Amino acid sequence: MSDETVTVFASFVPGEANVEAAAAVLRRMRAATRTEPGNQKYDLFRAESGGRATFHLIERYTNQAALEAHRATDHYRAYRAEIPDLLDEPIGVIVLTEVD
């Protein structure tokens, strides 16, 4: 398993009626994830385009093991059970490793 820092970029497109509910779920994740020992960054952003809200998340973990530990937490499992019903599209997730 790699000891390199892992960054995750995720995008969420909530249904028009679910924008605030999705924001609440993502804010709960932000608060809980920032307390994890392997988490270095967990920043949530909102964008408006064409009258549509989207959320973008940038997460950074000390290594792949820390990301896997994050995905095993109760708060992550609860979020993954709740968020899909609030979205119009699947979550767009890109896992990045630092080049420079």
Image (cartoon, rainbow, N blue to C red):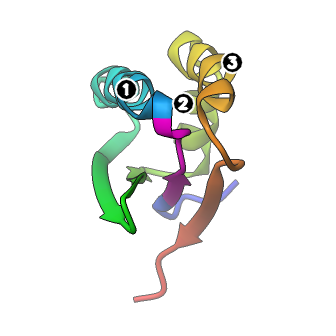
Point out the frontmost of discs 3 and 2.
Answer: 3
Given contact means CB atoms under 8 Å apart, are the residues at marks 3 and 2 in contact? Answer: no
Q: Position of residue 84 (x, y in %)?
A: 68, 31
Q: Earlier in the sequence, mark 1 or mark 2?
A: 1
Within the magenta stretch, is there residue 12? yes
Task: Bin the neighbour count of mark 3 within 10 Å (Cα to Cα): few under 14, some 14-19, many 20 and up.
Answer: few
Residue 36 appears left or right of 84:
left
Q: Which residue is mark 1?
A: 36
Given contact means CB atoms under 8 Å apart, are the residues at marks 1 and 2 in contact? Answer: yes
Quadrant of the frame with the C terminus: bottom left
- Nearer the observer, 54 or 33: 54
Task: Say which residue appears at 69% left-offset and 18% top-offset.
Answer: 81
Task: Say which residue appears at 40% left-offset and 37% top-offset.
Answer: 38
Q: Amino acid at mark 3?
A: Ala
Q: Amino acid at mark 1?
A: Glu
Q: Position of residue 85 (x, y in %)?
A: 67, 25
Q: Which residue is mark 3?
A: 81
